[in-house]
């Protein structure tokens, strides 16, 4: 065989060898080859099927052994049956293997031996799908590699039928078919906005679920525009679907988003007419529709041979279809005067009929005719204005794509002089490029987009400035734009709240809610977004009770609404769990956080940002429930994940390190807690967060750690700093942040000996908590307990025991019986018994406390304090031996964690001195 013929047949051979025999024969018949070339190609494929190559046989045997050795379980999934096979992979139906919940997924495996190229493609598909989140794209749920090196993906299982089968059975009208196609356009637009080109859009890669939802599948040969690794050298691919592939794909030229537009155009024609083009003579079950000139023009524009003449984007394609439905001029048509006027008349048919009747009745009045002529000219001017607007929109779309391409290129490794290019590098490059532009129509939407992305990284200062600039003079013209702007205002409200401008945040959240009510009054998902945004602003304003009530309503509706997006469900869940934990509702907070994690585990890979939020919420619930060690483990997992997949700094790292400091503080590691709080402050400064409430909370948290270590004077100074910040910001007396810091300072005053001031403040705070939060609240219970601690320090057993009985009743309604606070209550009862001279009663209560701490594996600091107290009682009873045995292991723990003046260590040192211990 001559070399030129081999070269001509090679691309067809590589593509056709992946097809089954029936598909292969049909494809060969359509190839632009002469009879001899077709025969030669058929023989080559048959020889390839027959094998006979020893190397190929060895590889096949290895693949067979690999298949036999591979388990039917992949991660948490068990294979059920094969669903189908394509050129690169085989897809199986799978179900959960661990029984935690019921769910079916589609597992995609490589066919045969996992070659380097096939493995790279499957990994790239996983990378691409991990970045896409759209209701019309089958989601990536999990993935990995087996011990034998077999890579696999777990994808959303679509229970439905292929697109064309659904069209034939359930979509008889043009409206039905266009609705399906527009859902595909939305999916492709989402992929393109994430710089992903699908490259294999065809009927087999589109499913319609039983509920009518369109799902785009198989990103196996998709690629990232300007992606790293080897793909940046790739133009086309030999793997494509003839009949749907664009001319540039078949010719091996560069691939862009325009290639997907071409495939979409072919697919739309097949949906409408039952054939791909005029030469497609295959029998089709689809009833063909009559297409008007506009629709034929749209199809022609989408399938232009020259990519530059096609629609600039999937959004522009969709907009032309919307114009078609509304009877407006479409971009694909030639916009002559007559065409624009016909379109205007068609849209205002009744008005023109009435005008014609008036002319007919009063034809003697020539001025009437002139009046109608004037109206027609006005209509033509309106149509010309619409044409100019459409051209501007297309230009802006192209400008946006150019801008993104330039920004990404500016951060590419060869330009940035670094092999490691982070998300922040890309954003900074985009922001720098944007600063040089002077077109508000391009700049402001891009500013809003970048504000969201900087907000996700936790850079609140940059995000707030970008969003403020991007929203200047923004007014929605239609529903879609209103909903986009409402989302922008939600983000703006969040950023304003973090910065401490609560009034402006509430205005922004309310504006978003008003636009949703005006433009999408029946959209329940959009109402959920408004509830979430308003709840977060109420929290920032100090009204957690109102925020919790709103989030509870939102979560109940989100669970009842199947269409609730995961990111919205996760946001509501995380916020509610966090606020409930802060309010002392640990059990409910934990249940909500774990339910959220279960859903995220089912729908997202383990390395997804959503896990960070819910791990933090679960940790907060564990901390509130008296499990600081488990809280520390969860928080360290969340921090590691945040650093890997999002950013090592920013607002979220501020929150995570602050929460970790609280857990470590509860574990008695006060020096480490103080350093973590300083790290949290650095993250806060780096994120541009300077809101009074956040800074006051930071001062209060550091004061609490210093108090635990026994540095009461310095702690009180930090509390005073916190109050100065709150006073400067005009934070009122009943704001929850101020009241909590007041409670903590009063506790410190009581430990430092300022009993009278502490009693006055705690009594006043408890009365206000009863009025504001109610008797069943965690705040009221905490203040009652602090009064118990103060009565113990003041040696007032009568007052203290009455308060202790009340505190015990309140806490039993809030916390499980194994919560450590009930062991601390036994310590308090022992102290009050000792104040009354009841040494036996004191010993009984303290022995129960020590045994309880030992049984639950309590923190060393808590156990050591209880042992030192029991040692003092045993010394008072004359048993110096047991007293020494109890105190000897406790002293090193107390000395390591606390300063000499800390109240518990000071008492233990007095006992040690009496026992002669050093």
Image (cartoon, grey):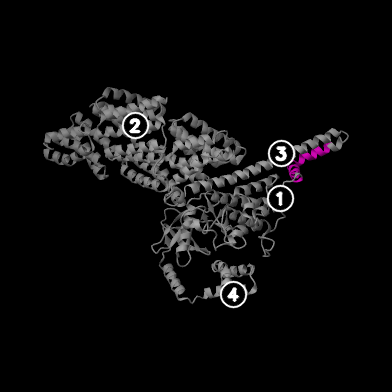
Mark 2 or mark 1, whichever is nearer to me: 1
Residue in the image at 44% along x and 37% along y: 460
Task: Give the alpha-carbon distance from disc 3 to disc 4, as whole Å.
Answer: 61 Å
Q: Quadrant of residue 788?
A: top left
Q: Earlier in the sequence, mark 4 or mark 1?
A: 4
Q: Position of residue 672 (x, y in %)?
A: 28, 40
Span of residues in magenta = 338-358
Residue labelled with disc 4: 40
Q: Earlier in the sequence, mark 4 or mark 2?
A: 4
Residue 294: give its label: 1
Q: Are marks 4 and 2 in contact (CB under 8 Å)?
A: no
Q: Is residue 355 magenta?
A: yes
Q: Quadrant of residue 749?
A: top left
Mark 3 or mark 1, whichever is nearer to me: 3
Q: Earlier in the sequence, mark 2 or mark 1?
A: 1
Residue labelled with disc 3: 382
Relative height, residue 64 to residue 726 (above, below): below
Task: Give the alpha-carbon distance from disc 2 to disc 1, as whole Å.
Answer: 66 Å
Residue 699: give its label: 2
Instruction: Look at the numbered disc 2 and give the secondary structure of its residue.
Output: helix
Q: Earlier in the sequence, mark 3 or mark 2?
A: 3
In which quadrant will I find the C terminus? top left
Q: Main secondary structure of the magenta part?
A: helix
């Amino acid at each position: 065989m001559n070399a030129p013929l081999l070269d001509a047949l090679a691309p067809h051979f590589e593509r056709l060898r992946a097809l089954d025999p029936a598909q292969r024969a049909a494809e060969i018949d359509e190839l632009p080859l002469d009879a001899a070339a077709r025969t030669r190609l058929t023989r080559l494929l048959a020889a390839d099927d027959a094998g006979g190559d020893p190397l190929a046989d060895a590889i096949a045997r290895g693949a067979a052994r690999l298949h036999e050795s591979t388990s039917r379980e992949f991660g948490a999934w068990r294979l059920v049956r094969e669903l189908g096979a394509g050129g690169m992979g085989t897809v199986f139906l799978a179900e959960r293997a661990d029984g935690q919940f019921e769910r079916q997924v589609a597992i995609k495996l490589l066919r045969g031996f996992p070659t380097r190229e096939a493995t790279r493609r499957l990994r790239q598909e996983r990378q691409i799908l991990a970045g896409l989140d759209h209701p019309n794209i089958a989601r990536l749920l999990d993935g990995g590699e087996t011990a034998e090196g077999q890579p696999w993906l777990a994808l959303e299982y679509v229970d439905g039928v292929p697109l064309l089968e659904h069209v034939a059975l359930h979509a008889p009208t043009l409206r039905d078919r266009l609705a399906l196609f527009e859902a595909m356009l939305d999916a492709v637009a989402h992929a393109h906005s994430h710089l992903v080109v699908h490259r294999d859009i065809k009927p087999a890669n589109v499913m319609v679920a039983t509920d009518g939802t369109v799902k785009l599948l198989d990103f196996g040969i998709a690629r990232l525009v300007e992606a790293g690794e080897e793909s940046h050298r790739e133009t086309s691919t030999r793997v494509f679907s003839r009949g749907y592939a664009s001319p540039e794909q078949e010719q091996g030229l560069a691939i862009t988003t325009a290639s997907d537009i071409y495939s979409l155009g072919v697919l739309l024609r097949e949906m409408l007419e039952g054939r791909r083009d005029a030469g497609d003579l295959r029998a089709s079950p689809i009833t063909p529709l009559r297409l008007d000139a506009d629709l034929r023009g749209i199809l022609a524009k989408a399938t232009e041979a020259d990519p530059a003449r096609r629609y600039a984007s999937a959004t522009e394609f969709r907009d032309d279809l919307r114009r078609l439905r509304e009877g407006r001029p479409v971009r694909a048509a030639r916009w002559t005067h007559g065409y624009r006027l016909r379109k205007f008349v068609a849209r205002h048919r009744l008005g023109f009929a009435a005008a014609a009747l008036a002319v007919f009745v009063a034809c003697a009045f020539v001025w009437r005719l002139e009046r109608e002529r004037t109206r027609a000219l006005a209509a033509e001017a309106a149509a010309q204005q619409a044409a100019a607007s459409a051209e501007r929109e297309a230009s802006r779309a192209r400008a946006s794509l150019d801008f993104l391409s330039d920004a990404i290129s500016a951060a590419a490794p060869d330009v940035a002089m670094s092999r490691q290019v982070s998300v922040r590098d890309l954003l900074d490059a985009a922001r720098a490029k944007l600063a040089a532009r002077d077109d508000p129509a391009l700049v402001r939407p891009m500013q809003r987009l970048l504000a969201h992305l900087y907000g996700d990284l936790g850079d609140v200062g940059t995000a707030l400035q970008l969003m403020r600039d991007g929203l200047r003079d923004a007014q929605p013209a239609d529903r879609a734009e209103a909903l986009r702007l409402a989302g922008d205002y939600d983000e703006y409200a969040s950023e304003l709240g973090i910065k401490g401008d609560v009034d402006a945040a509430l205005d922004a959240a309310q504006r978003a809610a008003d636009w949703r009510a005006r433009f999408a009054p029946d959209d329940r998902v959009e109402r959920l977004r408004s509830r979430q945004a308003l709840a977060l602003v109420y929290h920032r304003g100090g009204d957690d009770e109102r925020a919790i009530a709103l989030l509870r309503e939102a979560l109940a509706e989100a669970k009842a609404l199947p269409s609730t997006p995961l990111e919205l469900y996760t946001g509501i869940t995380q916020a509610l769990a966090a606020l409930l934990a802060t309010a002392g509702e640990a059990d409910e907070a934990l249940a909500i956080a774990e339910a959220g994690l279960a859903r995220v585990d089912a729908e997202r890979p383990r390395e997804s940002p959503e896990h960070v939020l819910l791990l933090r919420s679960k940790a907060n619930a564990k901390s509130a429930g008296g499990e600081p060690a488990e809280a520390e483990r969860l928080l360290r997992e969340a921090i590691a994940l945040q650093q890997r997949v999002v950013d090592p700094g920013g607002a979220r790292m501020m929150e995570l390190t602050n929460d970790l400091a609280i857990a470590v503080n509860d574990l008695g590691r006060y020096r480490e807690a103080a350093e973590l709080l300083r790290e949290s402050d650095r993250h806060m400064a780096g994120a541009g967060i300077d809101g009074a409430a956040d800074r006051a909370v930071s001062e209060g948290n550091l004061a609490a750690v210093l108090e635990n270590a026994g540095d009461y004077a310095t702690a009180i100074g930090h509390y005073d700093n916190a109050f100065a910040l709150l006073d400067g910001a005009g934070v009122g007396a009943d704001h929850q942040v101020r009241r909590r810091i007041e409670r903590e300072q009063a506790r410190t005053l009581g430990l430092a000996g300022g009993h009278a001031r502490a009693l006055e403040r705690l009594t006043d705070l408890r009365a206000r908590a009863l009025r504001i939060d109610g008797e069943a609240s965690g705040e009221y219970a905490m203040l009652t307990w602090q009064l118990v601690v103060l009565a113990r320090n003041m040696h007032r057993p009568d007052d203290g025991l009455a308060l202790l009985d009340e505190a015990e009743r309140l806490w039993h309604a809030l916390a499980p019986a194994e919560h450590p606070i009930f062991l601390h209550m036994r310590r308090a009862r022992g102290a009050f018994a000792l104040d009354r001279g009841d040494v036996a009663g004191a010993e009984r209560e303290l022995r129960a406390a020590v045994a309880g701490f030992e049984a639950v594996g309590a923190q060393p600091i808590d156990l050591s304090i209880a042992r030192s107290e029991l040692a003092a009682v045993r010394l008072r009873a004359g048993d110096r031996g047991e007293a020494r045995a109890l105190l000897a292991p406790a002293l090193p723990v107390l000395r390591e964690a606390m300063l000499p003046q800390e109240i518990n260590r000071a008492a233990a040192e007095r006992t040690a001195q009496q026992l002669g211990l050093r």
